[in-house]
Amino acid sequence: MERQAYFQETGRRKESIAEVRIVPGSGAFLVNGVPYEERFTRFVHQVTITKPLAVTGAIGKYDVSVKVLGGGLTGQSTAISHGLARALVEADESLKPALRKHGLLTRDSRIKERKKVGLKGARKSAQSPKR
């Protein structure tokens, strides 16, 4: 049996890590073995996930399989989008300028700031005892 070629990349955002694998096919999109519409019910997340495919006009050209863990739904959806954009560039280098123009290849490096000693959170301090 002939092995089918696939392209795999990793996307990250906040605490989320997504391993995205694309194979030329009919357009199936699975996240952790479940269709992505079931896993991400909010329309905003669905648009974020499919944006690299929409920008490149590749909707229905690839079967996408994703393994995602860590973080919340927003971080996971953005991590999937980042990994998918990187996998599309690996599959076809000519898509890079369009994806770069829309900011889909840049990793969003914002993470949660750590709590400091003597403060209530990362920046909030205790109320001053004036009276």
Image (cartoon, grey):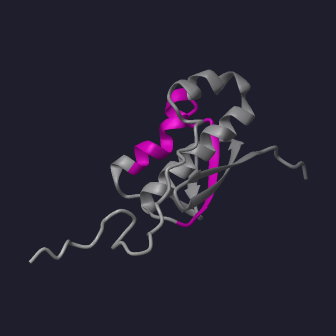
Residue that lies at the very extreme toward the left in this rendered image:
131
Q: With 125 as the anchor, is 47 left or right in this view? A: right
Query: Can you see residue 37?
Result: no
> Picture quarter containing residue 107?
top right
Residue range of the region highlighted in magenta in the rendering: 45-70
Q: Quadrant of residue 19?
A: bottom right
Q: Which one is in front, 18 or 115?
A: 115
Is residue 58 highlighted in magenta?
A: yes
**Residue located 69% across and 21% down the image:** 94
Q: Residue at x 20, y 72 (%)?
A: 127
**Where's residue 85, x and y in %?**
61, 38
Residue 50 point in image, percent of width and height: 49, 41
- Quadrant where the C terminus sits is bottom left
Residue at 42% across, 48% down: 46
Instruction: Describe residue 7's horizontal placement relative to residue 52 as left or right.
Output: right
Horizontal side of residue 3 vs 100, given as left or right: right
Taking the view exactly as shown, the residue that stands out farthest to the right is: 1
Residue at the (49%, 50%) spot, across then down: 110
> Which residue is the extreme one toward the front?
131
The x, y position of residue 84, in whole percent, is 61, 43
Residue 2 in view: yes
Q: Is residue 104 above or below residue 81?
A: above
Residue nearest the viewer, comparing 118 with 92: 118
Is residue 46 a member of the stretch shown in magenta? Answer: yes
